[in-house]
């Protein structure tokens, strides 16, 4: 297994916890205290390291990507390296869903759970897509916030605890 380090970074949607090894990112997610009640977005908040633990410095590519996503999205480049031990080449449906979403649903776009299931190769697997979204280890990078319901509802984010965050992100991408 990998030796990982982690950092907490400020962002417009609150502090993010980022975990990584020498090979790439292991996870990125909002700190656990953020929910629909406590969410206080600040679109001017810069991406800055608040604290770090471990021996490995946070990949610059990750900080750059986050900065670009929030503050200069017209220049969004390819996402930072993900650790191959997290996103392996083995073709579980879940990983296939993540990859499909990452490669096919770009900034400012949305897709329904059913469409994503079909894109990932099983049009009857909308429910499994929902599960894959809840288990997504790479918030923002693998854009599970762009997956919405077929009736136009935005659907749940973080199991329904952070729907305001999803709404904020979708709105951010429409500006
Ligand atoms: Zn690793």
Image (cartoon, rainbow, N blue to C red):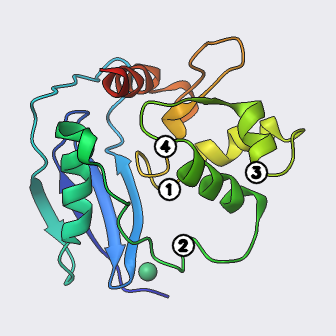
Disc 2 and disc 1: Cα gap in Å? 9 Å
User: Where on the image, by quarter, is ligand 1?
Assistant: bottom left
Q: Is residue 68 left or right of residue 151?
A: left
Residue at (36% x, 42% y) in the render: 32
Say what secondary structure mark 2 lies in.
loop
Residue at (62% x, 76% y) in the render: 88
Say what secondary structure mark 4 lies in.
loop
Residue 146 in picture, x, y percent from top left: 52, 33
Q: Disc 1 designates what residue?
A: 137
Say what secondary structure mark 3 lies in.
loop
Q: Which mark sits nearer the N-terminus, 2 or 4?
A: 2
The answer to whether 118 is drawn above or below residue 141 in the figure is: above
Q: Disc 3 designates what residue?
A: 120
- Marks 2/1 in contact by CB < 8 Å: the verdict is yes
Q: Which mark is residue 86?
A: 2
- Count neighbours of disc 3 (C-alpha within 10 A) and say few if under 14, some if 14 to 19, many if 20 or more: many
- Count neighbours of disc 4 (C-alpha within 10 A) and say few if under 14, some if 14 to 19, many if 20 or more: many
Q: Which mark sits nearer the N-terminus, 1 or 3?
A: 3
Q: Which mark sits nearer the N-terminus, 3 or 4?
A: 3
Q: Nearer the viewer, residue 146 or 3?
A: 146
Q: Disc 4 designates what residue?
A: 143
On the image, which quarter does residue 167 sit in? top left
- Marks 3/4 in contact by CB < 8 Å: the verdict is no
Residue 49 in picture, x, y percent from top left: 11, 57
Q: Which mark sits nearer the N-terminus, 1 or 4?
A: 1
Disc 3 and disc 4: Cα gap in Å? 15 Å
Disc 3 and disc 2: Cα gap in Å? 19 Å
Give the label, 1 or 4, closer to the camera: 4
Disc 2 and disc 4: Cα gap in Å? 17 Å
- Marks 3/2 in contact by CB < 8 Å: the verdict is no
Give the label, 3 or 2, closer to the camera: 3
């Amino acid at each position: 297994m990998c030796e990982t380090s982690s950092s907490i970074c400020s962002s417009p949607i609150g502090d993010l916890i980022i975990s990584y090894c020498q090979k790439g990112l292991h996870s990125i997610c909002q700190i656990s205290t953020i929910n629909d009640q406590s969410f206080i977005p600040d679109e001017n908040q810069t991406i800055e390291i608040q604290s770090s633990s471990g021996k490995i410095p946070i990949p610059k590519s990750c900080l750059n990507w986050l900065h670009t996503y929030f503050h200069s999205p017209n220049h969004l480049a390819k996402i930072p390296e993900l650790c191959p031990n997290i996103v392996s080449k083995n073709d579980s449906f879940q990983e296939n869903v993540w990859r499909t979403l990452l490669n096919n649903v770009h900034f400012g776009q949305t897709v329904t759970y059913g469409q994503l299931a079909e894109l990932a190769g099983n049009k009857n697997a909308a429910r499994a897509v929902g599960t894959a979204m809840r288990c997504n280890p790479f918030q923002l990078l693998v854009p599970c916030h762009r997956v919405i319901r077929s009736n136009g509802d935005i659907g749940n984010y973080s199991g329904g605890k952070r729907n305001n965050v999803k709404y904020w992100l979708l709105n951010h991408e429409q500006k």
